[in-house]
Image (cartoon, rainbow, N blue to C red):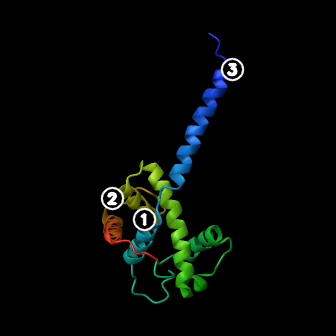
């Protein structure tokens, strides 16, 4: 049985429209409050090595090789670890940008499960993978991040 070409075209347009609107919705689903809570949770849970010049930078304990790509993505230019370390505003801007990107990805991947998204981002932050943080140090780290995130999310919103 032959399908009507107009009907096929029309159904393709409808499917494309549905997918594109779902993608647009997914890209906008993470709120500023969620990003801010995640950024603060990552900062508060950052492992403190107790070693000066440990090779990690800012309150978020970021590796220099990681910072290179992040700053290029978020600021459209590379910054040095020293610039990142010495400017809390720049550090927060870069971390917020990356956190928004990763939270958006995780919200899509987890079908909008906020806790699973936070856990996925925290695991990725620590290991580079969204999964596999179920035991040991990484599991404890995830638990801290989720706890700090929930604390931040439960605070009343402040108005500028």
- Quarter of the image that includes the N terminus: top right
Q: Residue furthest bottom?
A: 52
> Are the residues flagged by discs 2 and 3 in contact, CB closer than 8 Å?
no
Q: CA distance from mark 2 to mark 3?
A: 51 Å
First in residue order: circle 1 vs circle 2: 1
| Residue beneath the point at 54% across and 54% down | 27
| Residue beneath the point at 46% across and 90% down | 52
Q: Residue furthest front?
A: 159
Q: CA distance from mark 1 to mark 3?
A: 45 Å
- Image x and y of residue 134, in percent: 33, 58
> Are the residues flagged by discs 1 and 2 in contact, CB closer than 8 Å?
no
In which quadrant of the rendered view does residue 131 lie?
bottom left
Q: Which residue carries the number 3 mark?
A: 5
Q: Which residue carries the number 2 mark?
A: 134
Rendered view: 111 above or below 38: above
Left or right for 27, reference 73: left
Rendered view: 68 above or below 7: below
Q: Residues within 10 Å of mark 1 (few under 14, many from 20)?
A: many
Q: Residues within 10 Å of mark 3 (few under 14, many from 20)?
A: few
- Image x and y of residue 98, in percent: 54, 66
In this view, the residue in front, 128 or 117, is: 117
Mark 3 lies on a secondary structure that is helix
Q: Which residue carries the number 1 mark?
A: 34
Mark 2 lies on a secondary structure that is loop
First in residue order: circle 2 vs circle 3: 3
Rendered view: 118 above or below 7: below
Q: CA distance from mark 1 to mark 2?
A: 23 Å
């Amino acid at each position: 049985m032959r399908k009507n070409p107009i009907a096929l075209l029309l159904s393709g347009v409808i499917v494309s429209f549905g997918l594109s609107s779902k993608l647009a919705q997914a890209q906008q689903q993470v709120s500023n409050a969620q990003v801010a809570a995640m950024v603060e949770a990552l900062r508060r849970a950052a492992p403190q090595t107790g070693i000066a010049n440990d090779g990690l930078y800012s309150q978020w304990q970021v590796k220099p090789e990681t910072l290179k790509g992040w700053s290029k993505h978020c600021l459209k230019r590379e910054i040095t670890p020293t610039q990142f370390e010495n400017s809390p505003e720049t550090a927060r801007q870069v971390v917020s940008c990356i956190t928004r990107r990763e939270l958006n990805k995780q919200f899509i991947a987890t079908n909008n499960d906020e806790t699973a998204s936070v856990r996925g981002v925290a695991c990725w932050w620590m290991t580079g993978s969204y999964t596999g943080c179920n035991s040991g140090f990484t599991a404890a780290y995830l638990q801290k991040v989720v706890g700090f995130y929930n604390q931040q999310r439960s605070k009343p919103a402040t108005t500028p």
